[in-house]
Amino acid sequence: MKPALPDRSQSDVVLIVDDVPDNLSVLHDALDEAGFTVLVATNGESALQRALQALPDVVLLDAMMPGMDGFEVARRLKANPATAPIPIIFMTGLTETEHVVA
């Protein structure tokens, strides 16, 4: 039996940014099923555009992407007054101690 989902008159918007299609699919399906409106970007440039257009409630951001990495995307989002208040949650497959950001 699935737990009851909260009654949402307006769904929260989540922007998922990842360059790996399988990751996007799993996250999209889980969040969509939970009642969120899900937006997707596959690179840093499109993430910045989507965030500015949609002003999502939260961004799930892959740290390691080709081209503009997640850290640069986060810096640019936080530098823009329109997107600065949006919370960012980093995602990564890195597990080694030297990859930890303090």
Image: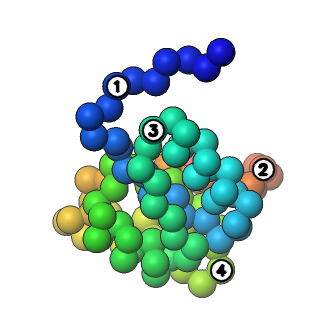
Circle 4 residue: 66
Q: In 3D space, how far apart are the residues under numbered discs 1 and 3 (Cα atoms)? A: 9 Å
Give the mark, 1 or 3, whose residue is nearer the N terminus: 1
User: Number of callouts in the render?
Assistant: 4
Query: Looking at this rendering, what residue extends furthest in the bottom direction?
Result: 67
Residue 61: x, y in percent? 53, 59
In primary-sequence order, the first of circles 3 and 4 is: 3
| Residue ID for mark 3 | 35
Identify residue for label 1. 7
Kindly report which numbered mark, 2 or 1, lies closer to the viewer in this rendering.
1
Identify which amino acid the numbered label 1 is placed on. Asp
- Of badges 4 and 2, the one in the foreground is 4
**Is the residue 94 above or below the residue 68 in the image?**
above
The reply, left or right, for residue 60 in relation to residue 97 is left
CA distance separating discs 3 and 4: 30 Å
Q: Quadrant of the N terminus?
A: top right
Report x, y in % for residue 50.
38, 71
Which residue is outermost to the left?
81
Q: Earlier in the sequence, mark 4 or mark 2?
A: 4
Residue lying furthest right? 96
Q: Which residue is mark 2?
A: 95
Determine the CA span between mark 2 and mark 3.
30 Å
Please name the amino acid that badge 4 sits on.
Pro
User: Label 4 vs label 2: CA separation?
Assistant: 19 Å
Mark 4 Cα-neighbour bin, 10 Å: few <14, some 14–19, many ≥20: few
Q: To which quarter of the image does residue 98 belong? A: bottom right
Residue found 43% across the figure and 43% down from its top: 36
